[in-house]
Image: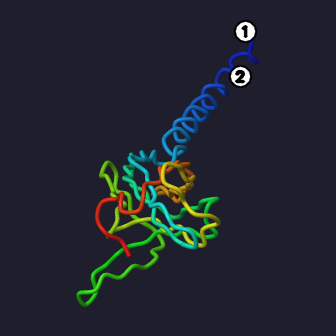
Amino acid sequence: MNTKRIFSRRRALPVARLAASVFAVALATGAVAEVRVDGPWARATVAGQQASGAFMTLTSSSDARLVGVQSPAAGNAEIHEMTLENNVMRMHAIDSLPLPAGKPVELRPGGYHLMLLELKKPLDAGQSVALTLTIEDAQGKRERVDVQAQIRPLGGGHGRMH
């Protein structure tokens, strides 16, 4: 009888089970929420204009938050919200925007939107502008989503902003 062989099989089974469990946990928790981006666009600017808005619809596969935005076209980019205060529409930056699982969240003029500030050059209609969205899942893991937003002419969007 080969005692060495029996001993190694007994040890191998628990190790294999542990490895399978770790792999299953990694699969279950390793992926950040998948976010679909639909209809991204930004408003064109005129010479000397230092800011513009970007809009789109975001749909996350699981609960997540939009926690940041960057663009090489802007010195600064922020997530903004328009609110009605004393019958006056006010715009202000927010730290994050909830993305509930499976529910489209619309970034649009007059509502939630992205502000591109300190523009490095005018945004010309017909071109596109690169955006990088930072998404955080419910476990705090972050992922970047690259977006090309089509630049629409002034007045080419829907609704009013600023």
Q: What residue type is labelled 1?
A: Met
- Label 2 vs 1, first from the N-terminus: 1
Question: Which residue does the image show at 39% across and 48% down from the upper left?
Answer: 39
Q: Residue 23: percent from the left, percent from the top?
A: 57, 35
Question: Which residue does the image show at 31% across and 52% down from the upper left?
Answer: 104
Label 1 Cα neighbours within 10 Å, binned few <14 / some 14-19 / many ≥20:
few
**Comparing marks 2 and 1, which lies closer to the viewer?**
2
Between 112 and 63, the residue placed more toward the observer is 112
Which residue corresponds to mark 1? 1
Question: Which residue does the image show at 54% across and 60% down from the upper left?
Answer: 123
Residue sitting farthest toward the front: 47
- Callout 2 secondary element: helix
Disc assigned to residue 122: none
Label 2 Cα neighbours within 10 Å, binned few <14 / some 14-19 / many ≥20:
few
What count of labels does the image hold?
Answer: 2
Q: Residue 72: percent from the left, percent from the top?
A: 64, 59
Question: Which residue does the image show at 61% across and 33% down from the upper left?
Answer: 19
Instruction: Give the quadrant of residue 17.
Output: top right
Q: Is residue 148 left or right of residue 60?
A: right
Residue sitting farthest toward the top: 1
